[in-house]
Image: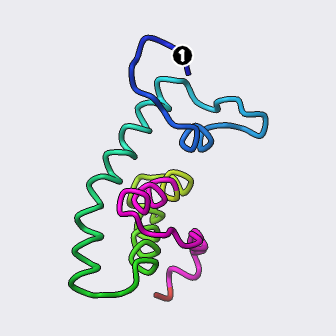
Amino acid sequence: MYDDNQIHVPPSFMAVYSDARGRLTASANEVRARYELCEDLAGHLVEQAQTLYHVQAPSEAEILRRIHAGLCAAESGVPVPEATWITTRLAELLNWPCPELVAPAPQSAEGAEGV
């Protein structure tokens, strides 16, 4: 991305909004705005992840998987590829190894009724 804006969008995030040929699937301004939101969210989740680690003491990987699952929920307003990027970035910020992140299977309308 080249323009007068000084925000550098990393290749890892550009990949979220690129097709198989590497072309952006959204405008440069939209990608930049989404990147800023996702980077901010990852930064805000650092303290929450550290607190969970010290209070509940599950593994680092389990905390990251739980955060990823929460971000993948429809109510979060974050598409699954962004949720994966945010969680991976969170692991980088915490200097934790990032586990394999698998998006939860979408629930069918029938399956949701019986819950």
Q: Residue at x 49, y 69 (%)?
A: 97
Kindly indicate the quadrant of the structure image that contains residue 58: bottom left
Residue at image x 57%, y 74%? Answer: 107
Tell me which residue sits at (40%, 32%) in the image. Answer: 33
Residue 37 in the figure: left or right of residue 8: left
- To which quarter of the image does residue 15 belong? top right
Is 101 left or right of 86, judged from the image as shown?
right
- Residue farthest along the top direction in this orientation: 4
Q: Is residue 106 magenta?
A: yes
Choose between 56 and 17: the one closer to the eye: 56
State the residue in front, 23 or 61.
Answer: 61
Kind of element beneath mark 1: loop
- Say if 71 sits above or below 1 in the image: below
Residue to which mark 1 is pinned = 2
Q: Which residues are magenta?
A: 85-113
Classify residue 21 by image quadrant: top right
* Place of residue 78 in the rendered image (x, y in percent of width and height, measured from the top left): 44, 52
Relative side of 25 to 13, left or right: right
Residue 83: say if magenta: no
